[in-house]
Image (tube, grey):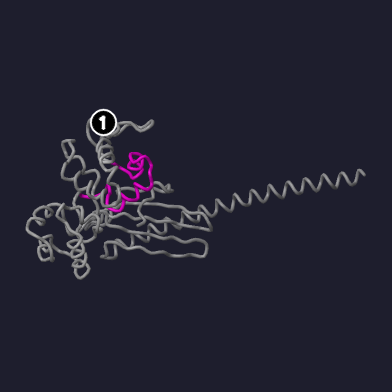
């Protein structure tokens, strides 16, 4: 009987030890996968930077696989989008023309009812006073509005109530890293349509068809696009550029079922690339670039 009890105790001890060992092994395996996924994401970022330096293309994406990991990447010219920091002018006042353009864009992406609220909240974050606008806010939980320009997408997420649906719609045509003007050669249809009340679907399609045949070298070339009128051209010419130097690079690395995400924004100038912003281990609510 004593022998049986001893054997039972040994069996329970071995079983417990085995379960604990398996648990440790799983944790170690997950940590190894996390590290591999992060290294893959960094490799993807390096690859994106290399492509940006060596190619003339303004927007591209792709994926690569390794024996133990993989990554997918996306590079975008940020100056094909409306700059949210330009909602407020140099005097700290709301730039009405820019606000109207962003409002038109919001309506085009399904945010018509909430557009006034988001404009007021975004402007409150970056204006120079501490007085909330009619639909705005100056405080978010424990965070006070900084009353300076947005420095990260995480700040935008906070102002947008961390609503990923709203944020993803805005990211289609809004940024916080640009010159404030729209790159005619990469702007998505919704941004082109929001340039002016006079922009029609036909005109937007013709602009896209024209740049596919040959990229615009000068804004004046818009005059040759079918459907363009003198009035529309006068309304939009000062809003446009035909090139851009600010790019975002978004990478997702994966090993097994573990994913790690990184993002960066750089300026591409004659002397090379300059890093403006970098974030590792991005949360889904901040990782809004895929479109």
Q: Quadrant of residue 213?
A: bottom left
Would you say residue 159 sits in the magenta stretch?
A: yes
Residue at point 47% right, 61% down?
A: 70
Nearest the camera: 11 or 166?
166
x, y (%) of residue 128? 22, 33
Q: How many marks?
A: 1
x, y (%) of residue 268? 25, 56
Q: Quadrant of residue 98?
A: top left
Q: Secondary structure at mark 1?
A: loop
Residue at point 86% right, 44% down?
A: 6
The magenta stretch is: 150-179
Nearest the camera: 163 or 31?
163
Nearest the camera: 188 or 116?
116
x, y (%) of residue 137? 30, 33
Q: Quadrant of residue 76?
A: bottom left
The answer to whether 22 is drawn above or below residue 134 in the figure is: below
Q: Which residue is mark 1?
A: 132
Q: Residue furthest bottom?
A: 213
- Horizontally, is 138 left or right of 44 in the view? left
The answer to whether 101 is drawn above or below residue 134 in the figure is: below
Nearest the camera: 266 or 256?
256
Q: Quadrant of the C terminus?
A: bottom left
Q: Residue furthest left?
A: 230
Q: Residue furthest right?
A: 1
Residue at point 10% right, 57% down?
A: 233
- Horizontally, is 231 left or right of 84 in the view? left
Label 1: how many Cα within 10 Å (few below 14, some 14–19, many 20+): some
Q: Quadrant of the N terminus?
A: top right
Would you say residue 68 sits in the magenta stretch?
A: no
- Horizontally, is 254 left or right of 190 in the view? right
x, y (%) of residue 166? 34, 46
């Amino acid at each position: 009987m004593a022998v049986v009890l001893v054997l039972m105790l040994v069996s329970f001890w071995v079983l417990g030890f085995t379960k604990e060992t398996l648990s440790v092994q799983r944790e170690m395996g997950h940590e190894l996968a996390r590290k591999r996924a992060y290294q893959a994401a960094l490799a993807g970022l390096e690859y994106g930077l290399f492509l940006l330096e060596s190619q003339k293309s303004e927007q591209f994406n792709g994926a690569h696989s390794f024996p133990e990991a993989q990554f997918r990447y996306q590079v975008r010219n940020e100056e094909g989008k409306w700059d949210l920091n330009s909602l407020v002018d140099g005097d700290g006042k709301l730039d009405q023309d820019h606000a109207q353009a962003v409002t038109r864009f919001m309506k085009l992406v399904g945010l018509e009812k909430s557009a006034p609220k988001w404009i007021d909240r975004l402007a409150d974050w970056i204006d120079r006073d501490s007085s909330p606008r009619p639909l705005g806010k100056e405080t978010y939980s424990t965070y006070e509005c900084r009353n300076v320009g947005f420095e990260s997408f995480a700040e935008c997420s906070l102002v947008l109530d961390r609503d990923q649906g709203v944020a993803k719609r805005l990211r289609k045509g809004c940024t916080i890293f640009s010159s404030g003007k729209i790159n005619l050669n990469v702007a998505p249809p919704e941004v082109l349509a929001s340039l002016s009340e006079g922009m029609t679907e036909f005109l937007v399609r013709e602009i896209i068809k024209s740049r596919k045949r040959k990229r615009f070298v000068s804004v004046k070339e818009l005059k040759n696009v079918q459907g363009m009128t003198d009035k529309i051209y006068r309304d939009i010419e000062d809003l446009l550029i035909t090139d851009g130097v600010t790019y975002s690079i978004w990478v997702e690395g994966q090993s097994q079922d573990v994913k790690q995400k990184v993002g960066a924004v750089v300026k591409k100038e004659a002397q090379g690339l300059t890093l403006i912003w970098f974030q590792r281990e991005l949360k889904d609510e901040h990782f809004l670039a895929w479109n």
